[in-house]
């Protein structure tokens, strides 16, 4: 009386590896170009766009920004 029960536990269900590549397409958002301060604009320097840009901060001059308006 020896009946070794061998439960068939052969779960060999292959999961379909459908790794669909999710295209993380980032829509282009038109970034507003940082406004250059009057000093950088006059000297055509690269302005940081900060309250006090590096150029003005280095020279210790007041950094002022003139809002562009009426340009159409
Ligand atoms: Zn500047
Ligand atoms: Zn500045």
Image (tube, grey):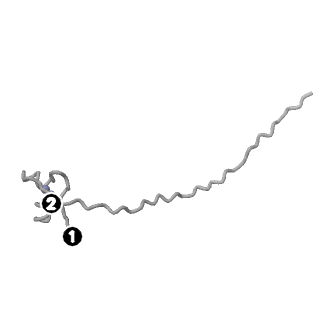
Residue 27 x %, y %: 41, 61
The quadrant of the rendering that contains the C terminus is bottom left
Which dot marks residue 71? 1
Q: Work out whether mark 2 precedes mark 1 in sequence or the reverse, and give the earlier one.
A: 2
Residue 18 x %, y %: 61, 56
Which dot marks residue 36? none
Number of residues whose C-alpha sits closer than 10 Å to that of mark 1, classed few (under 14), some (14–19) or many (20 or more) = few
Of all residues, the one furthest to the top in this rendering is 1
State the residue at coordinates (89%, 31%).
3
Give 27 or 18, whichever is nearer the viewer: 27
Secondary structure at badge 2 equals loop
Look at the numbered disc 2 and say if its residue's Cβ is closer than 8 Å to ligand 2. no
State the residue at coordinates (69%, 50%).
14
Number of residues whose C-alpha sits closer than 10 Å to that of mark 2, classed few (under 14), some (14–19) or many (20 or more) = few
Residue 43 x %, y %: 10, 65
The quadrant of the rendering that contains the N terminus is top right
- From what the image shows, is residue 12 above or below residue 68? above
Give 61 or 12, whichever is nearer the viewer: 61
Q: Quadrant of residue 39?
A: bottom left
- From what the image shows, is residue 43 above or below residue 14? below
- Asked if residue 20 lies left or right of residue 27, the reply is right
Secondary structure at badge 1 equals loop
- Asked if residue 10 lies left or right of residue 38, the reply is right
Of all residues, the one furthest to the bottom in this rendering is 72
- Asked if residue 71 lies left or right of residue 38, the reply is right
Query: Disc 2 and disc 1: Cα gap in Å?
Result: 13 Å
Of all residues, the one furthest to the right in this rendering is 1
| Residue pointed to by mark 2 | 66
Say whether marks 2 and 1 touch (CB < 8 Å): no
- Asked if residue 21 lies left or right of residue 10, the reply is left
Q: Quadrant of residue 65?
A: bottom left
Quarter holding ligand 1 = bottom left
């Amino acid at each position: 009386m020896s009946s070794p029960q061998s439960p068939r536990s052969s779960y060999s269900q292959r999961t379909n590896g459908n790794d669909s590549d999710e295209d993380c397409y980032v829509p282009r958002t038109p970034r507003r170009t940082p406004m250059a301060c009057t000093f950088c604009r006059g000297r055509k320097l690269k302005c940081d766009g900060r309250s006090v840009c590096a150029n003005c901060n280095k020279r210790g001059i007041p950094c002022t920004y003139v809002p562009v308006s009426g340009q159409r």
